[in-house]
């Protein structure tokens, strides 16, 4: 009898320890959810369960190796810090593939003890069913915006080739030489508009199935399929569409597993004669970080770039938007905006929308004086012109190197890394071309600048402290 009581006492103690751990884990989860946001938390962290504690180490379980590796890379240090803050006795967190073992109940022991395993198995099945249900509740693709049509797209010299290619695909999908169609250009130049226009045109008759999504959503859907053990359903859904459109493909850089899935989906659709449309901020050959085989396949169709807008195109865009609004906007105001806001069509349209809203709300005419008053913050930002010399000086001061090292031949890491950061910031904050930037750094070749930008981008993704340094320098230069 004493032995049985001891057994019950041991189980009760184990349950008590588990209850305490559950309380701490609940608090940690709340902190994580607040820090990373609901979407990221549900995608990466919600499936973590508590394993055993061994000395100063706690084990956390994840359902797949992919999730374990991702969480270890992205959140491992943060999980250790949070557990140590909750329980100072825990100094390390070990992540492994598996699930938490249930605390045994002595009443279930013996020959009839099979029910002890049935409960956790049923719980796992229930979680899988729940995740699959969650997966099916979301549409495969994002909705198409009815405002983004070919009729509302303003065509000019910088975008006429991309527009013509998009039209061709919308009229005759999977035409030889146009599959895939790869659109690339800077932020806010019209890539997404053209993709929505293609989708709207193709779905007008209801006979063509189109799936449009961002590369980020593609990744989240893929992860959700892994979590819910429904990857086959995910593959079948994607490969059954007539047209697949993926926006902002550069998001997949560094996401090797998702790139692998996209590559196989790409091949399956093209081999079946289906159309693929992709957009990114750079051409396939410049997307360093994508697998070579994927870059090669992306470049085998039609590659169309959208250049930065000209003054004439910006005027045409503003005239079109102003006419659609029904508010009279003087030509001198449109010219003023077209001269001041040059880099981003989205920001240009946003400035005009703010002016029109102000005129409608207060019943006042749009004037040049009112424009300068209403848009003072935007105009101030665009008046700020960062020079390469200023960038070099700030970066040299930050890393305590000589200004002359920016253009010297020295290749020591203590000098080369700050020089690469300065090149990266010059590319981000100025309108200078790559050869122009190279000349400012000791007449270096433009490929050296390209390598520096790619290297700094890669390091920022891997090293949080380094990314914070670069972001601090950016804010200092922009302020």
Image (spheres, rainbow, N blue to C red):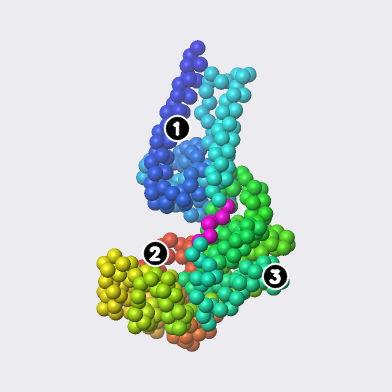
* In the image, residue 470 above or below residue 30: below
Q: With 370 as the anchor, is 38 left or right in this view?
A: right
Residue shown at 45%/46% (left/top)?
92
On screen, residue 238 versus residue 367, left or right, reads: right
Indicate the position of residue 142 as horizontal and vertical percent values. 53, 56
**Could you tell me which secondary element the residue under label 1 belongs to?**
helix
Residue 8 percent coordinates (x, y): 48, 20
- Which residue appears at 57% of the width and 25% of the height? 116
Residue depth check, mark 3 versus mark 1: number of the one nearer the observer: 3
Instruction: Identify the magenta region.
Output: 140-145
**Mark sitting on residue 468:** 2
Q: Neighbour class for label 2 at 10 Å: few (<14), some, many (≥20)?
A: few
> Which percent across, then down, holds residue 258?
59, 57
Q: Which mark is residue 175?
A: 3
- Residue 95 lies, in percent from the top left, at 52, 46
Residue 18's label in the rendered image is 1
Q: Quadrant location of residue 466?
A: bottom left
Residue 382 image label = none
């Amino acid at each position: 009898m004493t032995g049985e009581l001891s057994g019950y006492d041991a189980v009760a103690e184990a349950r008590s320890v588990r209850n305490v751990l559950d309380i701490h884990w609940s608090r940690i989860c709340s902190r994580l959810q607040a820090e990373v946001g609901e979407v990221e938390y549900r995608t990466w962290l919600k499936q973590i369960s508590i394993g055993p504690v061994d000395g100063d180490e706690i084990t956390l379980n994840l359902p797949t190796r992919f999730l374990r590796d991702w969480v270890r890379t992205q959140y491992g240090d943060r999980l250790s810090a949070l557990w140590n803050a909750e329980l100072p006795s825990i100094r390390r967190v070990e992540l492994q593939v598996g699930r938490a073992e249930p605390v045994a109940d002595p009443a279930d022991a013996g020959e009839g003890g099979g029910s002890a395993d049935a409960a956790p198995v049923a719980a796992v099945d229930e979680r899988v069913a729940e995740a699959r249900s969650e997966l099916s509740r979301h549409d495969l693709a994002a909705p198409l915006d009815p405002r983004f049509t070919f009729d509302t797209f303003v065509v000019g010299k910088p975008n006429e080739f991309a527009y013509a290619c998009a039209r061709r695909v919308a009229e005759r999908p999977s035409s030889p030489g146009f599959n895939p169609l790869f659109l690339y250009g800077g932020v806010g130049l019209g890539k997404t508009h053209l993709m929505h226009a293609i989708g709207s045109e193709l779905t007008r008759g209801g006979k063509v199935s189109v799936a449009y999504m961002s590369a980020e959503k593609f990744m989240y859907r893929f992860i959700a399929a892994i979590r819910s053990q429904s990857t086959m359903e995910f593959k079948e859904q994607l490969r059954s569409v007539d047209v697949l459109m993926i926006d902002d493909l550069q998001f997949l850089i560094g996401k090797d597993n998702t790139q692998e899935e996209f590559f196989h989906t790409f091949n399956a659709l093209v081999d079946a004669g289906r159309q693929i449309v992709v957009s990114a901020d750079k051409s396939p050959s410049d997307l360093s970080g994508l697998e070579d085989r994927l870059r090669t396949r992306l470049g085998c169709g039609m590659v169309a770039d959208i250049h930065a807008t000209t003054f004439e195109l910006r005027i045409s865009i503003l005239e079109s938007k102003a006419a659609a609004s029904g508010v009279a906007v003087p030509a001198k105001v449109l010219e003023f905006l077209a001269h001041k806001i040059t880099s981003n069509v989205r920001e240009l349209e946003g400035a005009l929308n703010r002016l029109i809203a102000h005129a409608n709300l207060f019943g006042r005419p749009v004037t040049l004086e009112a424009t300068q008053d209403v848009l003072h913050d935007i105009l101030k930002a665009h008046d700020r012109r960062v020079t390469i010399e200023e960038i070099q000086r700030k970066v040299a001061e930050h890393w305590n190197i000589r200004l002359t090292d920016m253009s010297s031949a020295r290749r020591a890491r203590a000098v080369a890394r700050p020089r690469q950061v300065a090149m990266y910031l010059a590319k981000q904050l100025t309108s200078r071309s790559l050869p122009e930037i190279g000349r400012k750094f000791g007449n270096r070749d433009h490929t050296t600048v390209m390598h520096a930008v790619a290297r700094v981008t890669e390091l920022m993704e891997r090293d949080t402290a380094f990314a914070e340094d670069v972001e601090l320098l950016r804010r200092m230069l922009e302020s």
